[in-house]
Image (tube, helix red, strand yellow):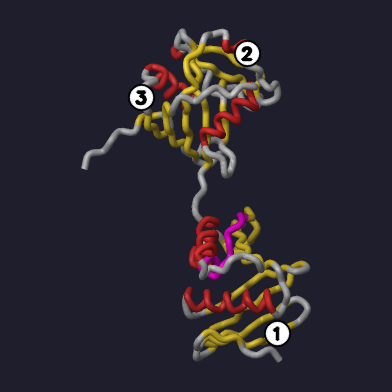
């Protein structure tokens, strides 16, 4: 018989141990519920709890259960699944050492309604939540993450802007793209130009910083528009579109952009091209007006 697991007055007493489920009755001076781990696949288990007594008690109970599962049961991964609307349960999972890993859309059926389920996981070799590294990793897994986009505004001596005909939409687009994880935006802009056009032009500074709201299935993002400089129109003959993502490239004057580019670029590009020596602080292509106290 397994000895009770304790943390101060909190006690977990083994109630069931079979090939699938290991369940503990939880007491805190009196019975407050149960916690259990269900073996789902070799080396992995699903943690479930039904407890009264508040979030702090639930966190302590889950930490005791987790250490038992990793130690005595020899599991290497534990998982928690939480209805995305149950924010208190999500906080318990995070504070117990489980990192948010993703969302299973419509995975739960609750009273006839399809609900999304958030998945939280912990590995045996993860740093624990009472360490600086462990707590930082937990917070990083749960905090919002925005895409960062880096585009390059390349001009010619006639005041035109270089635009690309891309393979995935009708709108003409600036060279550049999404910044990769662990890549700074300027490096991302240069990498994208090298991949798409065969040449990474020197970046002379930042022309605009723009926030983009959700659009056509994309989440919101921060976009940086870099200054690719002013060049002779013959530059276009030295660039080599990749033929896969970029089908062709061309120069366009500011007054002919409407209908060729997205409404976003139709708003902001003429403004940026008219004042290329300013840093444009934008929200969805519109200047952000400073507020007075």
Give the mark, 1 or 3, whose residue is nearer the N terminus: 1
Q: Callout 2 environment at 10 Å: few (<14), some (14 to 19), or many (20+)?
A: few
State the CA–CA distance, disc 1 to disc 3.
69 Å
Can residue 22 be seen here? The reply is yes
Residue for point 47% across, 32% down: 224
Residue for point 52% across, 36% down: 185
The x and y percentages for residue 176 are 56, 28
Q: Where is the N terminus found, in terms of image quarters?
A: bottom right
Residue for point 56% across, 20% down: 172
Disc 1: which residue: 16
Disc 3: which residue: 278
Along the viewing direction, whichever of 138 and 234 lies nearer the viewer: 234
The x and y percentages for residue 52 are 51, 80
Along the viewing direction, whichever of 172 and 240 lies nearer the viewer: 240
Q: Is residue 12 left or right of residue 292?
A: right
The x and y percentages for residue 65 are 62, 78
Task: Give the label, 3 or 2, closer to the camera.
Answer: 2
Q: Which of the 4 image quadrants contains residue 170?
A: top right
The x and y percentages for residue 281 are 37, 32
Disc 2: which residue: 238
The range drawn in magenta is 92-103
Q: Where is the C terminus found, in terms of image quarters?
A: top left
* Helix, strand or loop at mark 1: strand
Give the mark, 3 or 2, whose residue is nearer the N terminus: 2
Say whether residue 277 is magenta: no
Residue ranking furthest to the left: 293
């Amino acid at each position: 018989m397994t000895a009770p697991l304790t943390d101060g007055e909190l006690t977990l007493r083994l109630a069931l141990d079979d090939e699938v489920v290991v369940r503990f009755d939880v007491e805190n001076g009196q019975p407050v519920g149960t916690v259990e781990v269900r073996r789902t696949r070799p080396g992995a288990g699903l943690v479930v709890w039904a407890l009264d007594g508040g979030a702090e008690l639930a966190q302590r109970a889950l930490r005791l259960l987790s250490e038992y599962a990793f130690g005595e049961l020899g599991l290497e991964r534990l998982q928690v699944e939480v209805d995305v609307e149950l924010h208190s349960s999500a906080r318990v999972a995070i504070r117990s050492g489980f990192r948010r890993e993703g969302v299973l859309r419509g995975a739960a059926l609750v009273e006839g309604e399809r609900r999304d389920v958030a998945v939280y996981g912990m590995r045996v070799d993860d740093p624990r939540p009472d360490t600086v590294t462990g707590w930082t990793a937990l917070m990083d897994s749960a905090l919002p993450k925005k895409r960062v986009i880096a585009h390059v505004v390349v001009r010619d001596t006639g005041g035109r802007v270089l635009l690309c005909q891309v393979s995935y939409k009708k709108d003409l687009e600036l060279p550049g793209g999404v910044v990769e994880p662990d890549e700074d935006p300027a490096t991302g802009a240069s990498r994208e130009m090298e991949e798409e056009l065969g040449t990474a032009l020197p970046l002379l500074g930042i022309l605009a910083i723009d926030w983009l709201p959700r659009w056509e299935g994309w989440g919101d993002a921060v976009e940086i528009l870099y200054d690719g400089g002013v060049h002779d129109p013959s530059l276009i003959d030295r660039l080599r579109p990749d033929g896969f993502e970029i089908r062709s490239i061309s120069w366009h004057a500011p007054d002919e952009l409407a209908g060729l580019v997205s409404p976003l670029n139709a708003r902001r590009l003429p403004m940026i091209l008219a004042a290329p020596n300013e840093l444009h602080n934008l929200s969805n292509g519109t200047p952000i007006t400073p507020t007075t106290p």
